[in-house]
Image (cartoon, helix red, strand yellow):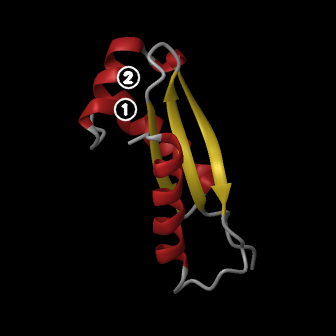
Amino acid sequence: EIKPAAGVFAFICAPTGQTWLGTAPNLGQIANRIRFDLNLGKHRNAALQAAWNAHGADAFRFEEREAIDADTPDYLRPQLLKARLEHWRAQTGAE
């Protein structure tokens, strides 16, 4: 069984340079989910939704910042993802 790549990602608004960071258990699917929520106008992050509404879909890009080792045990993944997210927030100053 191949586990999906989990990790930290960035969603970036090119016109403003605003960056939103998050974690996902499946980096291959998270960008589509975020874009779907934003297109519906129902994303839980109000600042991200406002930027999307103001600048449109073409102004945004998705970047994988870090994937965690696929062999990381399931019970350790949440803590590791949280720690890596905090690391990237400290490095970038992003939300």
Q: Quadrant of residue 56?
A: top left
Q: Quadrant of residue 46?
A: top left
Report whether residue 41 is seen: no
Q: Percent position (x, y) of residue 67? A: 67, 60
**Residue 83 drawn above or below residue 48:** below
> Which amino acid type is marked by label 2?
Trp
Q: How many marks?
A: 2
Asked whether 13 or 86 is in front, the reply is 86
Q: Which residue is pictured at 46% across the width and 34% down the height?
A: 35
> Which amino acid type is marked by label 1?
Leu
Element type at marker 1?
helix
Q: Is residue 51 left or right of residue 11?
A: left
What mark, if any, has residue 6 been given in the picture?
none
**Residue 59 drawn above or below residue 82:** above
Decide which of tag 2 and tag 1 comes sooner along the chain. Answer: 1
Element type at marker 2?
helix
From the viewer's perspective, is the residue at label 2 or at label 1 nearer?
2
Q: Percent position (x, y) of residue 41? A: 28, 30
* Distance CA(mark 2)–CA(mark 1): 7 Å
Q: Which quadrant holds the C terminus?
A: top left
Q: Quadrant of residue 74?
A: bottom right
**Residue 7 drawn above or below residue 17:** below
Q: Which residue is pictured at 56% across the width and 47% down the height?
A: 9
Q: Which residue is mark 2?
A: 52
Q: Is residue 87 left or right of residue 73?
A: left
Q: Which residue is mark 1?
A: 38
Q: Which residue is pictured at 37% across the width and 22% down the height?
A: 52
Q: Which quadrant holds the N terminus?
A: bottom right
